[in-house]
Image: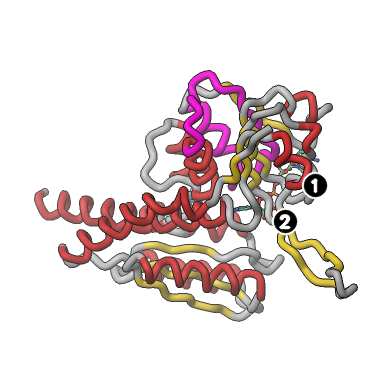
């Protein structure tokens, strides 16, 4: 089976070109896109993501500022910091870096971010709009995954699609986006009896679980598109016998790429596109804020 490895960088190229243009237009009108990142404690894995976000933001003429709070901060203090950002006109978008310490309630903190600045599209108001397929700020990873599927040229209408994982941040919104495209969607999760019977009949399989090797080549229909959203760190031993960490997805790439028509690598697949959609949301948030301001001025 011939297969095509889908590179996130290539899918991202036109998205990033469009963002740059929209950001420049906003700047000319006096509106500066500025993303405030909120980090609690000092997590090395989060640090890498934050540096990536900063690098991409700056390339796209989006200002980026990371605000780090001590690990011991209380939920109350964090909520106060978010409220201050919500009313700060210089901050146009807010991203909450994960993981948060256990003593902080993620739901409370996520819901405290003003929906108009929620560039991750995770506030209940923004998620709710996805149900109506009438949203401006949608969840980044699920939108990125749909962009990747579209890049294959497959017709989404009527496509048999299986999503493995039903989290609020990825699987559930992904199912909604795909239904909006008129795909026939099956969502699998922990309670699914025989995962392989579902994945084997799918024209496209999305996997967002966090379990390396969950999907193997024998679970995939020949020629299907396989979009691996999972990010896992596994320990491998190199040729010299030294143990080192490697980033892998949820799909066993070796066996799956033999059968798949298209497949995303990890790293370098969904991740860069997610980052692009995040930046597109940053620009969309400012456009929305500008339009609201202009409407208020006219009233
Ligand atoms: P999560 O909240 O832990 O959700 C995992 C989902 O997988 C749950 O819905 C869980 O179902 C389901 N699941 C667990 N075991 C399963 C099994 N054996 N078969 C089928 N489904 C199973 O994780 P998440 O935040 O959605 O993230 C999933 C993965 O994607 C992680 O590796 C994460 O790092 C990665 N991720 C990547 C990006 C990106 O940009 N590339 C962005 C976000 C997340 P139950 O709840 O029923 O157990």
Quick one: 93 or 156, which is closer to the camera? Answer: 156
In the rendered structure, does residue 20 fall within the stretch colored magenta?
Answer: no
Q: Residue furthest top?
A: 158
Q: Residue 167's x, y, as percent? A: 65, 43
> Which quadrant of the figure contains the N terminus?
top right
Q: Which residue is mark 2?
A: 248
Q: Which residue is mark 1?
A: 213
Please say whether residue 87 is visible from this viewpoint: no
Q: Is there any visible trace of residue 190 in the rendered image?
A: yes
- Give x and y (percent) for residue 206: 64, 38
Look at the image and give the residue range highlighted in magenta: 151-180
Residue at image coords 71%, 65%: 102
Is mark 1 in CB contact (under 8 Å) with mark 2?
yes
For label 2, the SS is strand
Numbered label attached to residue 23: none
Neighbour tally class for label 1: few under 14, some 14-19, many 20 plus, Cα within 10 Å: some
Of residues 37 and 102, which is closer to you in this image? 37
Q: Residue at x 59, y 72 (%)?
A: 48
Horizontally, is 127 left or right of 93 in the view? Answer: right
Q: Looking at the image, tell me whether mark 1 or mark 2 is earlier in sequence order.
A: 1
């Amino acid at each position: 089976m011939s297969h095509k490895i889908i590179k996130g960088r290539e899918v991202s190229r036109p998205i990033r070109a469009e963002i740059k243009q929209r950001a420049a237009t906003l700047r000319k009108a006096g509106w500066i896109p500025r993303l405030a990142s909120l980090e609690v404690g000092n997590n090395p894995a989060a640090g890498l993501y934050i540096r990536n976000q900063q690098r991409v933001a700056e390339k796209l003429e989006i200002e980026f500022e990371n605000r780090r709070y001590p690990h011991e901060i209380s939920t109350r203090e964090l909520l106060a910091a978010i409220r201050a950002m919500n009313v700060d006109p210089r901050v146009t978008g807010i991203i909450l870096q994960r993981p948060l310490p256990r003593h902080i309630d993620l739901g409370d903190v996520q819901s405290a971010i003003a929906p108009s600045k929620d560039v991750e599209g995770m506030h209940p108001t923004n998620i709710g709009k996805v149900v109506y397929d009438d949203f401006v700020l949608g969840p980044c990873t699920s939108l990125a995954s749909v962009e990747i599927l579209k890049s294959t040229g497959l017709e989404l209408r009527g496509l048999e699609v299986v999503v493995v994982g039903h989290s609020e941040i990825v699987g559930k919104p992904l199912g909604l986006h795909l239904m909006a495209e008129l795909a026939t969607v099956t969502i699998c999760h922990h309670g699914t009896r025989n995962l392989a019977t579902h994945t084997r009949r799918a024209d496209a399989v999305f996997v967002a679980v966090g379990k390396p090797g969950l999907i193997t080549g024998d679970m995939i229909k020949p020629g299907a598109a396989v979009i691996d959203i999972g990010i896992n760190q596994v320990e491998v031993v190199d040729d010299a016998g030294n143990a080192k960490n490697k980033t892998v997805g949820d799909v066993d790439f070796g066996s799956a790429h033999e059968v798949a028509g298209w497949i995303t690598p990890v790293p370098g697949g969904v991740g860069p596109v997610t980052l692009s959609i995040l930046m597109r949301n940053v620009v969309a948030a400012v456009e929305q804020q500008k339009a609201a301001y202009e409407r208020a001025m006219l009233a």
